[in-house]
Amino acid sequence: MTDAITNVGPAAVGAVVFVLLAAWCFSHRRVDQSLVALGLYLGLLDGYLKLRTGSPVITLARDVLVVAIAGGALLRAVQSNKPLPLPPIGVLVLAFSAVVLVELFNPDGPGLTVGAGGVRQHLEFVPLFFLGYAFMRRETQIQKLMFILVLCAAVGGFVSYVQSTLTPEQFANWGPGYRERILGTGTFAGAGRVAFDDSGVASVRPFGLGSDLGGGAVAAALALPSLIAMLMVAKPQARIWLMPFIVGIALAIATSGTRAALITAFVSAVSFAMLAAASRKALQVIAAIAVGVVVVYAAFEYLGPRNSTTQRAKSITPGRVVTTFSEERGSSVAKFAEYASKYPLGLGVGTVGPAAAALNDRPIASQAVLNIETEWNFLVLEVGLVGVALFLAINFRLVLALTRIRRIADHTMRLRLAALAAPLFGLLAADFAGTTTASVPPAPYFWFVGGVLSYWLVTAYQDEGRLNTTEEDQAASPGRAQAPPAGTRRPLSGVMPCA
């Protein structure tokens, strides 16, 4: 009896706290603050609670929070008779959502029950696109977003390091979900998340605070540009306080246990350098990235040669990356053409992916008949060529907007927007190694940051476009409006207060 009370007590308290949090998110007028709570939940608790309890139902908590925030904002907008502006890319996002809903009734689909889970895996974070566009309109809010990304990634990095020191059996004792994935039982039969050295000894591939291997490293890859930007804009005496975050993110990358996370981090860093560099600041950007590279290298050295990530890193050096990709993902990429010609209308949502595994209770290894090792295979099977085309159109439209970052006169704002935008290129690279739109943190990051950038680089840019160019651009075009005098408010540094 005492044991039962002991087990039920924390769960009951947690449920009450969550209900209060959801109610607060729904009723709180400062949507940006509600989004902070959601970000912390996704970054610090979502994956851990899922695996600690062993129940996939726990992931519905994040959907409740998203719906509470979006529903409360929508209700207040209706009550105040304020128009709800449609983001510039919003039509494409709504069209993609419509295709997903139509695929629910695909005659080749798995049925409405499983299909509903398939709709969820595609659309659960889409509301974040519209929330990011409507409520992230101050520079201070961008700063908070970057800090949350870095904080969650750093904490996850330290957790990844602790996990890397455990044996698979010790890690499996963290909870039923961990046990299932580490030991390869249940849904993960034949797909245990461990690595083997040359002598056949198994070692842990850390999850961090995510719900699968490499989760902590992917979070670090998304946060890395933000950390570099924070280092560049922080005052010298304040940079010492960033050291724990630097170490945490370096450890997350060095213990990733997956090549995809390493490539995502590399592409994100290089993209940041290309987006942020302008005029004399290029050397500063390169220097900051060089510091990051040194710290990550030091983390690899500290972990030693037995670190499983070190072995994977050697296979993606410049001289071997093409060969490794061809061996590991070449056949998966080639499958896209086959699926596109064979299933142009898709097979219906819920056919493959996390929803199919959870709701059909089929081992992941048994789903290998349909290859979803890339985002493109996943999308064409679930939503057909139309869905793939719309998803590509959304990415293409965002990439076009990102070209404007280098023309922003405010150096600090340019760095911050570049830090948020750069991981989108990393995610495009990751699309060739996994299903990014159906996993956390890539999916919420893509939709939320996509909405944020839609405002800052399309709407706000067009409103103040004649003032958004660098000094070099103005010198090349004498007829262009000049930048505001020193000491005045700069363009694109907080155009509109939060609704």
Image (cartoon, rainbow, N blue to C red):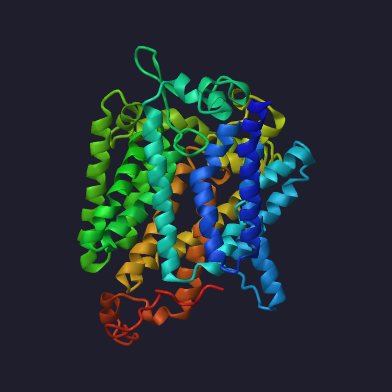
> Left of 321 or right of it: where is 346?
right
Q: Establish if 87 lies above or below 286.
A: below
User: Count of labels shown?
Assistant: 0
| In the image, farthest residue toward the front | 2
Q: Is residue 234 visible?
A: yes
> Left of 199 or right of it: where is 367?
right
Q: Which quadrant would residue 286 be assigned to in this image?
A: bottom left
Q: Is residue 109 visible?
A: no
Q: Establish if 323 lies above or below 293.
A: above
| In the image, farthest residue toward the top | 199
Tell me the quadrant of the picture where the N terminus can be found. Answer: top right
Which residue is at the front of the view, 239 or 330? 239
The spot of residue 56 in percent (x, y) is: 64, 36
Q: Establish if 138 lies above or below 467.
A: above
The spot of residue 243 in percent (x, y) is: 27, 49
The spot of residue 300 in percent (x, y) is: 27, 34
Which residue is at the front of the view, 489 or 111? 489
The spot of residue 496 in percent (x, y) is: 49, 77
The residue at the point 47 percent across, 64 percent down is 453
> Left of 337 or right of it: where is 106?
right
Tell me the quadrant of the picture where the C terminus can be found. Answer: bottom right
